[in-house]
């Protein structure tokens, strides 16, 4: 079955540690995205990538980093510089930028 | 910049009631419009979309019409079920903004038996 996988579903970290969230897709999509969702709020774009080896900052990129070494994978690192990292993180992909996006199940990160 | 405004929830309904969720947008050009649904603990699923004025998107009994004159894309369903309980997000994508999705804040819908 084609789709987007995110792992793990729940992640716990201590303050000051970097943590990497996984996102893999087997849909052969060129574009991939990372969003952050806070309780009762909409989604905010962190980073996006239109093609392998290229990515751009979204609206709230500070404290995050990404890489796009393979078409299928777009990992997100939440660094210790992110002041409020506890949130629900959603990865998405689309055939090309502008087409409808397909979302993964999300990773809930809790930093204490 | 682009923005999407949705009615605030939660919206609580009885089964078989009529559902309307208002959505209005601000955009510089002619965006594509989307409704996504998020069930508890899950990611978002595309519910329906419309790409030009007067288009009607429909899926699973839900409908929304792209109204350019009122910059709106209201979501409707004639008879809701308990399984429709979820959070609904209105979103737009505009070529001038690099085709990135801009989301509204989401509307939580709770359908009671």
Image (cartoon, coloured by chain):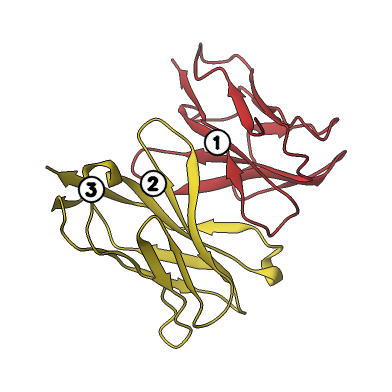
Classed neighbour count for the residue bearing mark 1: other residues with Cα under 10 Å, few (<14), some (14–19), many (≥20): many
Classed neighbour count for the residue bearing mark 3: other residues with Cα under 10 Å, few (<14), some (14–19), many (≥20): some
Classed neighbour count for the residue bearing mark 2: other residues with Cα under 10 Å, few (<14), some (14–19), many (≥20): some
Residue B1 can be seen in this image:
no
Which residue appears at 70% of the width and 45% of the height?
Answer: A48
Please tell me whether mark 1 sits on a helix, a strand or a loop. Answer: strand
In the picture, the disc for residue A101 is: none
Please tell me whether mark 2 sits on a helix, a strand or a loop. Answer: loop
Numbered disc 2: what chain?
A: A
Q: Quadrant of residue B74?
A: bottom left
Which residue appears at 36% of the width and 61% of the height?
Answer: B62
Which chain is rendered red in the image? A
> Do circles 1 and 3 both sit on a common chain?
no
Which chain is rendered yellow in the image? B
Numbered disc 3: what chain?
A: B
Which residue appears at 70% of the width and 69% of the height?
Answer: B95
Residues at discs 2 and 1 in contact (Cβ within 8 Å)? no
Depth order, front residue of A13/B26: B26
- Compare marks 2 and 1 and give the one earlier in the sequence: 2
- Reading the image, the residue beneath label 1 is A90
In the picture, the disc for residue B81 is: 3
Which residue appears at 57% of the width and 30% of the height?
Answer: A82
- Reading the image, the residue beneath label 2 is A41
Query: Could you say where residue A1 lies in the image, as x and y percent from the top left?
Result: 65, 30
Q: Quadrant of residue B72?
A: bottom left
């Amino acid at each position: 079955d084609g789709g987007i996988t995110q792992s793990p579903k729940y992640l716990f970290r201590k303050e000051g540690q970097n943590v990497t969230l996984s996102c893999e897709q087997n849909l052969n999509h060129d574009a991939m995205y990372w969003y952050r969702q806070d309780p009762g709020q909409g989604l905010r774009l962190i980073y996006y990538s239109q093609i392998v080896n290229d990515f751009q900052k979204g609206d709230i990129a500070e404290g995050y980093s990404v890489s796009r070494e393979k078409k299928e994978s777009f990992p997100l690192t939440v660094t210790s510089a992110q002041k409020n990292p506890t949130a629900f993180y959603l990865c998405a992909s689309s055939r090309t930028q502008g087409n409808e996006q397909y979302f993964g199940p999300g990773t809930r990160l809790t930093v204490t | 910049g682009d923005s999407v405004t949705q009615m605030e929830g939660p919206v609580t309904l009885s089964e078989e009631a009529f559902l309307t969720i208002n959505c209005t947008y601000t955009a510089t050009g002619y965006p594509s419009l989307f409704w996504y649904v998020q069930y508890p603990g899950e990611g978002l699923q595309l519910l329906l979309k419309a790409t030009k004025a007067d288009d009607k998107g429909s899926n699973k009994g839900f409908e929304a019409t792209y109204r350019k004159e009122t910059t709106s894309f209201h979501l409707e369903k004639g008879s809701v079920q308990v399984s429709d309980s979820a959070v609904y997000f209105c979103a737009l994508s505009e070529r001038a903004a690099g085709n990135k999705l801009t989301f509204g804040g989401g509307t939580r819908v709770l359908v009671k038996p």
